[in-house]
Amino acid sequence: MLTRAQIDPVVAAALAEDAPWGDLTGQVFLPAGATAAAQLVAREDGVLAGIDVLEAAFRLTDATVQVTPRAADGDRFTAGIVLAEITGPARAVVQAERVALNLVQRLSGIATRTRVLVDAVEGTGARITDTRKTTPGLRALERHAVCCGGGVNHRFSLSDGVMAKDNHLAVLREQGIDLTAAILGAREQLGHMTRIEVEVDRLDQIEPVLAGGVDVIMLDNFSLEELRRGVEQVAGRAIVEASGTITEETVAEVARTGVDMISSGALTHSVRSLDLGLDMAVSA
């Protein structure tokens, strides 16, 4: 789960961007003593993610604003459901509204999209995972949203694991370096807790990669038949990850090839924000 140490700096930066010198409109239009009661309402069905992020947007704007969740991260909901209630000074509630909505809508969109893929592969044994194709500065939040949708996380950063992709292999070929030898050399430099993954785009690359003792092999942009053949060739000697243009229509077929993991950058890089609204009543 997300911690305040992960949430607050991101939300504080967003609030500072949106109101660097305060909310001028609220200051000149809203009475200082006015209070507001608002509800976060779902305009469409989905999966919730980011309720603590929503709370942080109001808390960091004014600590007297109270946010009462009516649903938890990971909960499915239908249109019309109240997901949270917010009460406090009207100026503060209005000032934080856009940042709060922007973040919870995006995160819930990611969770909802992930849940669609997770449901599609249910019963196959394959798991849905994200990639590093996240919004700069929002990785921790977006990765959390993937988990809310039932997915799992890939490596968090370049520092967390070895993953040799096509560009790495191209450099090795240009330098005349044997792929198996390169993997074995990498293993010698790593601790026992660090995994090695290598991406391949042809079946004939599988044996040299496995000979190096990789932990995970990514079959990138393989056809369904090639995926099946790749899984048979690996034969349990490494975790098999499928990647490349994963959609709602194709993910179940990919899962049935026997792969262990299916990674999708689209979970985070091209997701549609979910339609959530903040219905508000203001009183003196």
Image (cartoon, rainbow, N blue to C red):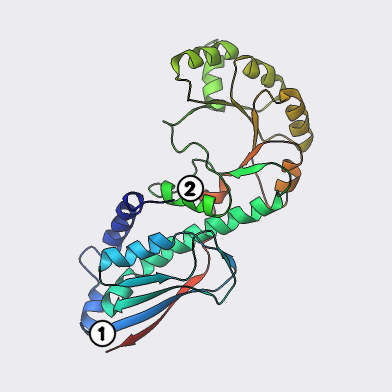
Residue hosting label 2: 143
Residue hosting label 1: 34
**Residue at left offset 65%, top offset 51%:** 117
**Rendering coords of residue 150 (x, y %):** 58, 51
**Rendering coords of residue 115 (x, y %):** 61, 55
Cα separation, mark 2 vs mark 1, equals 38 Å
Left or right: residue 247 versus residue 100 is right
**Quadrant that contains the C terminus:** bottom left
Report the amino acid beneath label 2: Arg
**Residue at left offset 59%, top offset 21%:** 214
Report the amino acid beneath label 1: Ala
**Residue at left offset 64%, top offset 18%:** 210
Decide which of 221, 158 is in the foreground and name it. 158
Left or right: residue 90 versus residue 217 is left
Decide which of 276, 47 is in the foreground and name it. 47
**Could one spot residue 219 in this view of the protein?**
no
Using the image, determine if residue 279 lies above or below residue 124.
below
Using the image, tell me which numbered label, if any, was put on residue 96.
Answer: none
Q: How many marks?
A: 2
**Rendering coords of residue 259 (x, y %):** 70, 36
Secondary structure category for the residue under label 2: helix
